Amino acid sequence: METIHKIGRRKKAVARVYLSEGKGNITVNKREFDNYFTTPTLRYKVQQPLALTNNEGNFDIQVNVYGGGVTGQAEAVRLAISRAMCELNEENRGILKPEGLLTRDPRMVERKKFGQKKARKKFQFSKR
């Protein structure tokens, strides 16, 4: 089996995933998976597609991720792994699609408007 390369995006984060047969090692930006994603929630998000398709420990995953924050990066990696799982076996699509793991989350940060404090928050109104 050759290496499968897929890209996942979320907010400003972009993740490139290289999936190959192995013992289940996940490397993120040349660091250990547990060192990069420190909280259990983020680890769960990344491993979700593997757990649903019963492929934990079957593949070595090499990830390059940049941009955004940790949550956005974790969800970008999750999307890329889900896409790789579908290319590996088309039956995985039926498992991952109902969970919403194959949909690119379109939500982005709303821009700040002039004359306002933030995107929607206004400056304090003074009557007098």
Image (tube, rainbow, N blue to C red):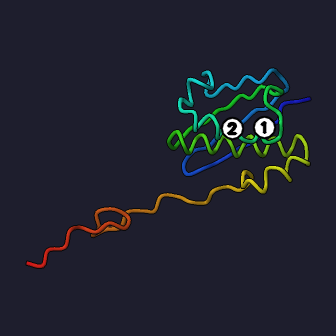
Q: State left or right for residue 16 relative to residue 74.
A: right
Q: Which mark is residue 60?
A: none
Q: Quadrant of the C terminus?
A: bottom left
Tell me the amino acid under the disc marked 1: His
Instruction: Point out the tag, 1 or 2, that comes first from the N-terminus.
Output: 1
Residue at the image position 53 percent from the left and 58 percent from the top: 108
Q: Residues within 10 Å of mark 2 (few under 14, many from 20)?
A: many
Specify the quadrant of the image occupied by residue 76. Answer: top right
Q: State left or right for residue 45 relative to residue 121.
A: right
Q: Which mark is residue 5?
A: 1
Front residue of this view, candidates 68 and 71: 71
Please tell me whether residue 95 is drawn above or below residue 26 in the rendered image. Answer: below
Q: Tell me the element at label 2.
A: strand
Residue at the image position 75 percent from the left and 41 percent from the top: 49
Q: Quadrant of the N terminus?
A: top right
Q: Which residue is mark 2?
A: 16
Front residue of this view, candidates 30 and 70: 70
Q: State left or right for residue 67 relative to residue 53.
A: left
Contact flag, marks 1 and 2 (Cβ < 8 Å):
yes
Q: Tell me the element at label 1.
A: strand
Please tell me whether residue 16 is drawn above or below residue 98 in the rendered image. Answer: above
Front residue of this view, candidates 35 and 8: 35
| Residue at the limit of the structure toward the bottom, as seen here | 127
Front residue of this view, candidates 113 and 105: 105
Residue at the image position 83 percent from the left and 27 percent from the top: 58
Residue at the image position 53 percent from the left and 29 percent from the top: 38
The alpha-carbon separation of the residues under discs 1 and 2 comes to 7 Å
